[in-house]
Structure formats: C-alpha cells, structure tokens
Amino acid sequence: MKKAIINKPYEDSEFLCFTTTNKGGYSQGNYGELNLGAYCGEKIDIVRENRSLVCSEVGVKGNMLFVPRETHQTESIIIDESFIQLSEEEQEQRMSNADALITSQPAIAIAISTADCVPVVIIDKKNKRTAAIHAGWRGIAAEIIIKTLDKMQTLQPMDRDQTIAIIGPCIGANSFEVDYDVWEQIAGVFTNPTSIFKEKNDKKYKVDLRRAAEIQSNRYCGEIIISQEDTKTSNNYYSARRDGFATGRFLSGAVIKG
C-alpha cells in the first residue's frame, strides 16, 4: 500500500499546512516517486493517483484538492462554494492562468506545485482563511505575494498578529544563479536589494529568493515560518534546475479543518 510522505510545518485545531516530498507515490523514472504536477509531462492518471494519496494524508476527499496551472504571473483565484460546484473542466479553465489560490472553505485543500520556486502558504486566523502562492523569480519581481495579500486585505481586513506565512522548501541562495537582467528585475522592487543579494561571480548573481519572499510576506504577516531546505541539493524534493523541466513537482498547501 502506497503512502504519500508529507511534512506538516504548521498545524493547530483549525488549520493544517502541508508540504509533500518526492517519496511514497506511483511515479517512476525522473518523476519518481510522488510527482503531483499535472503539467510537467507525466501521465495524468498517475498524477491523479498520487494526489489521491496526498488527500488521504491531509484528510480531504479525493476531488477536493485544487492546484492552479501556474504561469509565473500574479492572478489569484478564490475557491468558494460556487467554484466547487463547477465541473472539473470549468475549474481547470478558471485556474489555467492563476499562480495563487485563496479560500475560506473548510475540508478542502488548496496548494501550489513547485520544483525550485518559492511556495508561500498564508494562514489568516482572524478570518479563518488560507492562501497558497507560487512565487518564482518572476512572481517575486511582479510582487505576487504582496498582490495576493492586498487582495485578501481588501476582501476581509487581516490582523497582522493573527496572520502567518509559511515559506516552504525552495532553491537556496547558494544554488540560484541568474544573469544581470534577471537580477535587475528582482532587485527593482526592493528598497534594499542588497538584503537578497548573495554574491556575484563570473557575471552571475546569486539571489536569495527565500529572503525576498520573507520581506514581501512581512508586510502583512506577523509570524513567518521558513524552511531552510534547498530543493536543488535535497534528495527529498524535485528540482527543475537540477533535473530539467521533465521532472516532478511537489505541493505546498493548506486545509481549513471542517
């Protein structure tokens, strides 16, 4: 019997935050074992089986896990009761250009898939609400974290002392080298860009995306929980930088307990 191996960086009586690993599923080869990405080349039937294993571990029904397609933009989608009533095809269409999900619905899981990008999960305890945000370097440069939190604040004002950001495993600063044009785009949205600058070497810039996500989350979140695991060097997570695009994706997400 297969069992998805997941981590739970935050859990209380109302919320569960989870991060999957690459262990415990049905995938093989470059996707082994627990690929949960639907758009990275693996057969969708295997991805569905793997997602079902994750649903069992986080306590939701098999069709109650929602993951956007993720296109490195800034659109966020609200998963409410009317969304849940849509057909699977309509749901996928709605999420086809989204990089963040927001929900107040209990007993469902929202998550984003990554393989080096920064996963950020928001727990809004005041409004009993969660968000899952996919923040690659393009998302950081476009301020997707801030824009998603701005949207949440506009809909229902948050209490900073009751808002938590969980920053999951991502590529570490020592592993993330970019050219100057990429560094310039990222640095342009920070008042003090040297705080996310690691070093320069042979015209390559090392950037701390984890620290960048922390700074952006800090605008609204009074508590920030940060994983220090580097996906490129860890054996527990997928890494596109290490293995190429045709590898798996892991999930980071949250459940509001019913």
Image (cartoon, helix red, strand yellow):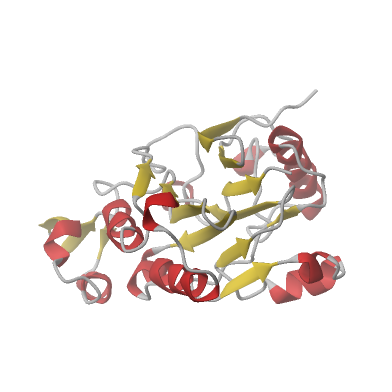
Q: Where is residue 181 shown, x and y percent of the image?
A: 24, 76
Locate residue 160 relative to residue 189 in the image: left or right: right
Locate residue 27 relative to residue 160 in the image: left or right: right
At horizontal 47% and vertical 68% (from top left) the residue drawn is 157
Q: Where is residue 254 shown, x and y percent of the image?
A: 60, 47
Q: Does residue 248 appear in the picture of this structure?
A: no
In the picture, the quarter occupied by the N terminus is top right
At horizontal 55% and vertical 68% (from top left) the residue drawn is 99
For the residue pair 66 and 171, the one nearer the viewer reads as: 66
In the picture, the quarter occupied by the C terminus is top right
Q: Where is residue 36 shown, x and y percent of the image?
A: 66, 48
Locate residue 82 relative to residue 101 in the image: left or right: right
At horizontal 46% and vertical 47% (from top left) the residue drawn is 239
For the residue pair 5 and 147, the one nearer the viewer reads as: 147
Q: Quadrant of residue 53?
A: top right
Q: Quadrant of residue 112?
A: bottom right
For the residue pair 209 and 224, the one nearer the viewer reads as: 224
